[in-house]
Structures are given as C-alpha cells and as structure tokens.
Image (cartoon, rainbow, N blue to C red):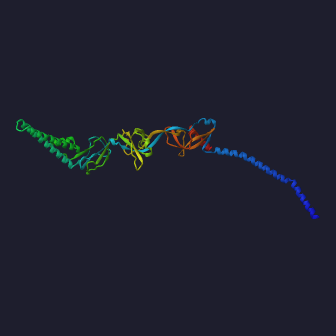
C-alpha cells in the first residue's frame, strides 16, 4: 500500500506544477519578450542614417541648396547638326607646275658646277659648264653650212650677171637660186642645233663672224626659283635627259595627303581645307582641294588629295609635315556644349541633374569639338538633363563636399 500512495502523491505534484507556472518561469518569459521588442525598436532607427550616409558619401554626386542650384543652368541633351571634320596627315611638296628639271642637251663632261641646293637663281643663269665633242661637231657643221651659203650667194650673183649679158639662160639662174635656198635652210638648221645644245646667241655670232669655236656649253636655268635638287658633280659625264638640277618656284606649294578609301567620297574639288604645320606654331593656312585621285593606292588603300597654298615668305619647305583639316558635310548627332564638359583624369564628364538639387558627375565618350559642340559617342541619352553652364564651379563644389 505504501508504494501505491507514494506514486499517487508524485503524480499530483506533477499536475500542480503544470497547471500553475512558477514565478521564475514567468520572469524568464517576460525578459525574453522585452529583449525582442527592444531589438526590433532599435534596428529601425539605425537603418535610415546608414542609407543617408551612403547617399551623401557618393564621391560623384553633389547635393546643393535651392539657392545654389539656381546658379547653374540645366538643359536637355539634344540632337544637333555636326560638321563632319576629318584630319589627314600630309606633307609639303613643291608645286610640280612651277618646277623645272634641267639637264644637258648633249653628252659631255661637267667641267664646272656653279649652283648649289638652296641657291636662288634667275631664268638664263648658268648652273654648270659642259665640254662635249658633240658641241664641237655642231659648230663645225654650222661653219660648213655658213661657207656653203656664202658660196651659193656668190654663185647666184654671177649667174645674174651672166643672164644680164645673155651668156646663160634663166634656167641656170633658177637652179643656182634653188641651191642658195637649200644652203640657207641648212645654215638655219645648224644655228638652231647650236641653240638647242645651249650655245647663246652671242656665241653663235662670234662663231659666224670670227669662226671661234666655243670649247664649253653652259647649262642654264629656264625658270626663276630655288635650286631644290642637284644631281651632278664636277667631272661627271652627263647624258641627254639626265636631270642635273631641279629648280622650283616655292611661292606656291602643294600640301599632299592620303585619305582612307572609305572616306574618298566625302571630299570634293574646291572644298575648303585648313592646313596646320607644326613648324609654324599656331598659324593656320587656308586653301582648297585642287586634286582628288581617281585611283586607290593598292599598298596603303588610300586616295591621294592635294591642295595649293600660297607661300610668299617661303616659310613652307618641301617635305615639312602638315595636317589637313577637312570641313565636309553635316550630320545629325547627339551633342553637348563644350562648356558642359569637365575634363578629369584624362576622361570627359558631364553633370546629370538627378532631380531636386542633386547632380551626378557622369562619364561620357565624346568626339573632337565641332565648333562649340562636342558630339557624344556613348554615356548619354537624348533628353537627359545636364548642366550646360557652370560645370567647372559645380565640380569644385563636389570636390569640396567630398573633402568635408
């Protein structure tokens, strides 16, 4: 009986504990509920300052007061007519229409050189002296023609006297007159040959009057200009057709460039072009396209173009490097004012208006300036509001806020 009663007593105690919680258990539950509630209340206010701090700490964004925001003008990025500008590398060359290549008319040996590269020469000025056996033979042929002409003239004079005395008939006189005409023609041909060789008129007169044979023939300039090339030395044997000197009038020069074949149709004759020569500093020359090649260079896949430029001070030298700036047609393209662009770390940026008084420095890719506009390649869409006046000062404000 005793074990049974002890078991019943134990069950009763367990039931009493389950139905009535102890004070210690209630304290634990209340403490847990209080800690949970405090944790929820403390998490909510800490989240908002973190988000605000993240927004303020963005180094590319600046927030202004309403009064400061009024100092900057905002407009939407729009499509504009952009002049298509091309830059082509080129070089200065002598104008071939004002260039003369001078050589010897006969085979001979150069006995004296009288001109050097860079010398200014006049038309008719002697550049070198040439000794030639052909010159001697040509002078002898002239003397023979001169002697034959004089003999034919005397024969005609005698025949005329004999006809007057009725000794010979008129047919004989006509025959001798024909022989005189042939002799005179041969004399003129011999004289012309001497002139082609290069013998002056005074030398031919001396040869005719005294029979003095000139030992040398001069090589003379046929144009007033500057000697830009010399390909002869003393003692050298020159052949007809060999260019010994090149004389050019450099008061007008060519600027020659090579245009990629895909851009060949964008250039027309008489199109205005600006020429920049690094040797002249900031000076810009103007001209017009005078030649566009009809063929493509197979090795470079380029088309040759050429413009003429006046050179009154002779500042432009052949083979100087130059840059051709071609202003062609217009195309519609998204563009921003050049004043809206901020240059930083070798990159281009604009300030985009995000709303209210918030502005963000946004990177963009731009083409070269076309007047006061910068064509946009990427980084900006049409209609995006941007700061077009005061970007520099706004960027200074952004940097100041970033330091603070």
* Residue 51 position (above or below residue 75): below
Q: Is residue 240 left or right of residue 94?
A: left
Q: Is residue 154 left or right of residue 189?
A: left
Image quarter in which the C terminus is found: top right
Residue 136 x/y as whole percent:
19, 48
Q: Is residue 145 left or right of residue 259?
A: left
Residue 370 x/y as whole percent:
49, 39
| The quadrant where residue 349 appears | top right
Is there any visible trace of residue 211 in the rendered image?
A: no
Image quarter in which the N terminus is found: bottom right
Residue 342 x/y as whole percent:
55, 42
Q: Nearer the viewer, residue 48 or 194?
A: 194
The residue depicted at 75 percent of the width and 48 percent of the height is 40
Residue 173 x/y as whole percent:
10, 38
* Residue 165 position (above or below residue 3): above
Total marks placed: 0
Q: Nearer the viewer, residue 215 or 167?
A: 167
Q: Is residue 217 left or right of residue 278?
A: left
Is there any visible trace of residue 88 in the rendered image?
A: yes
| The quadrant where residue 254 appears | top left
The residue depicted at 8 percent of the width and 39 percent of the height is 159
| The quadrant where residue 207 appears | top left
């Amino acid at each position: 009986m005793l074990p049974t009663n002890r078991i019943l007593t134990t069950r009763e105690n367990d039931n009493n504990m389950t139905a009535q919680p102890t004070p210690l258990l209630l304290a634990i539950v209340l403490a847990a509920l209080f800690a949970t509630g405090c944790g929820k209340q403390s998490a909510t206010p800490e989240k908002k300052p973190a988000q605000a701090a993240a927004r303020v700490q963005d180094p590319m964004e600046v927030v202004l007061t309403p009064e400061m925001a009024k100092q900057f003008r905002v407009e939407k990025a729009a499509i504009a007519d952009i002049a298509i500008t091309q830059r082509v590398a080129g070089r200065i060359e002598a104008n071939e229409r004002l260039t003369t290549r001078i050589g010897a008319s006969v085979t001979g040996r150069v006995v004296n050189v009288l001109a050097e590269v860079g010398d200014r020469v006049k038309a008719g000025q002697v550049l070198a002296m040439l000794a030639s056996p052909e010159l001697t033979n040509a002078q002898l042929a002239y003397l023979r023609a001169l002697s034959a002409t004089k003999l034919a003239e005397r024969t005609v004079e005698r025949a005329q006297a004999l006809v007057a005395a009725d000794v010979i008939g008129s047919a004989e006189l006509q025959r001798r007159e024909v022989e005189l005409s042939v002799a005179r023609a041969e004399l003129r041909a011999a004289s012309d040959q001497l002139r082609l060789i290069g013998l002056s008129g005074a030398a031919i007169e001396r040869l005719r009057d005294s029979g003095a044979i000139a030992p040398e023939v001069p090589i003379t300039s046929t144009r007033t200009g500057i000697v830009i090339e010399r390909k002869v030395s003393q003692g050298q044997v020159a052949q007809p057709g060999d260019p010994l000197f090149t004389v050019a009038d450099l008061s007008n020069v060519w600027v020659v460039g090579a245009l990629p074949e895909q851009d060949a149709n964008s250039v027309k004759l008489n199109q205005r072009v600006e020429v920049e020569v690094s040797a002249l500093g900031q000076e810009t020359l103007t001209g017009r396209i005078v030649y566009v090649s009809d063929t493509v260079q197979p090795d470079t896949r380029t088309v040759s173009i050429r413009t003429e430029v006046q050179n009154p001070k002779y500042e432009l030298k052949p083979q100087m490097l130059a840059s051709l700036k071609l202003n062609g047609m217009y195309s519609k393209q998204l563009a921003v004012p050049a004043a809206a662009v901020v240059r930083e770390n070798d990159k281009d940026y604009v300030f985009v208006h995000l709303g209210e008084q918030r502005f963000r420095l946004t990177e963009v890719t731009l083409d070269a300036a076309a007047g006061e506009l910068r064509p946009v390649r990427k980084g900006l869409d049409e209609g995006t509001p941007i700061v077009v006046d005061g970007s520099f000062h706004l960027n200074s404000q952004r940097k100041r806020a970033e330091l603070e």
